[in-house]
Image (spheres, rainbow, N blue to C red):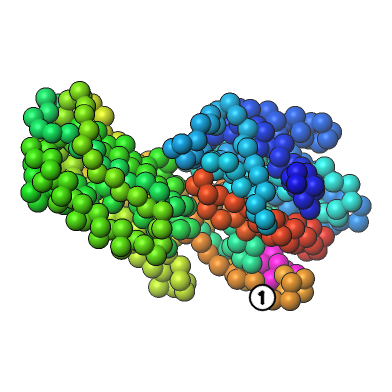
Amino acid sequence: MELSNIEPQIIWKNFSKLNAVPRPSKKEEKVIAFIKEFGENLGLETTVDEVGNVIIKKPATPGMENRKSVVLQSHLDMVCQKNSDTNFDFETEGIKMEIDGDWVKAKGTTLGADNGLGVATIMSILESSDIPHPDLEALFTIDEETGMTGALGLKPGQLTGQILLNLDTEEDDEIDIGCAGGIDVTITQNYETEAANGQMVRLEVKGLQGGHSGMDIHKGFGNANIILGRLLYKGLEKENIQLISIDGGGLRNAIPREAVAIVSVRNAQEFILEVTDLKKEILEEFATIEAGLQINIENTTSSEKAVSETDSKKIILTLKSLHNGVYRMSPDVKDLVESSNNVARVELKGGALKILNLSRSSVESSKYSVAEQLKSVAELAGMNTEFSGSYPGWKPKPGSEIVQLMEKIYIEKFNEKPHVVACHAGLECGIIGANYPEMEMVSFGPTIRGAHSPDEKANIPSAQKFWAFTKDILANIPLK
């Protein structure tokens, strides 16, 4: 079945068109042009601001002019992750999609349903002629996934809407009214290299399911960098180690699925036996939740120089010490992760070390507490730490008019109560709200699984539910 034949056809048609356009974070030139042309072809007022956000305005339909104005918002960029055996260039190729039962997925890559289905939904409303709605401002932001620079660059006064509907939530029975803020923590150091004085061993961790470093951080998924650190630390018990290279993880907001290290040890056989014992324990430990986990430990060769045993030990101890996962659960909101950290990327090449972290929290002081703990560990090891990309959280307002309206519509339409929640992901609402404090905001969306990983998939019946819900919300927006 072609995607264009799935209901609602208008959504999947626009999603297919969008996914034909390359849209990696920080390289959104093509998709900005695509959305700008889309708005102009509809004859709607279309502007691109200084940072690349696209704003398209559509007047209210007849009879809806006296309703509060609405901002429909989604981000244009997507997380670009692929399986190691997939040959794909996110900068030049469109996403290759397929249907698997009730799900749409991609072939070996992220699907881009996060946040492409939100973008496609807004496109569908903009081009419709039979959907009642108030005055609309469609806000398509850039670079949400790697810094939220689009939302950060949005200036006060560019929007006039009184209600913002963010279409970037991944459970169709949730109405999201709050989110976590975040900060990037980058640890670096450059080390002198020397000739390796032992036998080469390659350690590889792969087959983990990965996932969203906010929404999935509490689920107990394996982090390839942390598992690799455990293996290397175990090896230190019997061997002096010279690190040659480490290549683990990728984007800050994705839980690492794969990591590889090449080391030099004086007795490879003893080292492999020692680490293999821990390998067995780790595989058993993760058997229930990470059935695909593979750990390979084998002899190898390398002509590259190594970091000294002393500096290698510092790196391994640091990797073993960095906090990963939930830092604190919220004492105020049931089952909400308040603070966490994702050790997202570890790279050692030619003596240059870089460790990328993303620390999140719905409480600003707690966010910095996590970041400062990471910095403390790194500085004890003589490494440098930089904080960047900080963005605020979004404080819940459960009594707002739009939240109460959406709860009422959901119950009437689906005969069940929605979950009104705050999430541990970073949504743009907090940043936008800083410049538009009077704007009421809600986030919702269709069901998506495995976001930020090549296992990402979008539920077809859920998209139908989401589309019907969105249209009813717009038709019932409160009076001014």
Tell me the residue that label 1 is attached to: 417
Q: Can residue 250 be seen from the camera position used here?
A: yes
Left or right side of 45 for 295: left
Q: Can residue 344 be seen in this view?
A: no
Decide: is 470 above or below 79. Answer: below
In terms of depth relative to the viewer, which is nearer, 113 or 242? 242
Q: What stretch is highlighted in magenta?
A: 402-409
The foreground one among 433 and 219 is: 219
Instruction: Identify the residue at image location x=8%, y=40%.
Output: 267
Magenta run includes residue 47: no
> Is 463 drawn above or below residue 310 in the view shown?
below
Image quadrant assignment for residue 203 = top left
- Is residue 130 rendered to the left or right of residue 137? right
Residue that appears at 51% across and 45% down: 454
Question: Where does residue 407 sit, x and y in percent of width and height?
Answer: 69, 71
Q: What element carries label 1?
A: loop
The type of residue carrying mark 1 is: Lys
Q: Is residue 403 left or right of residue 335?
A: right
**Image position, residue 1 (x, y; %):** 75, 46
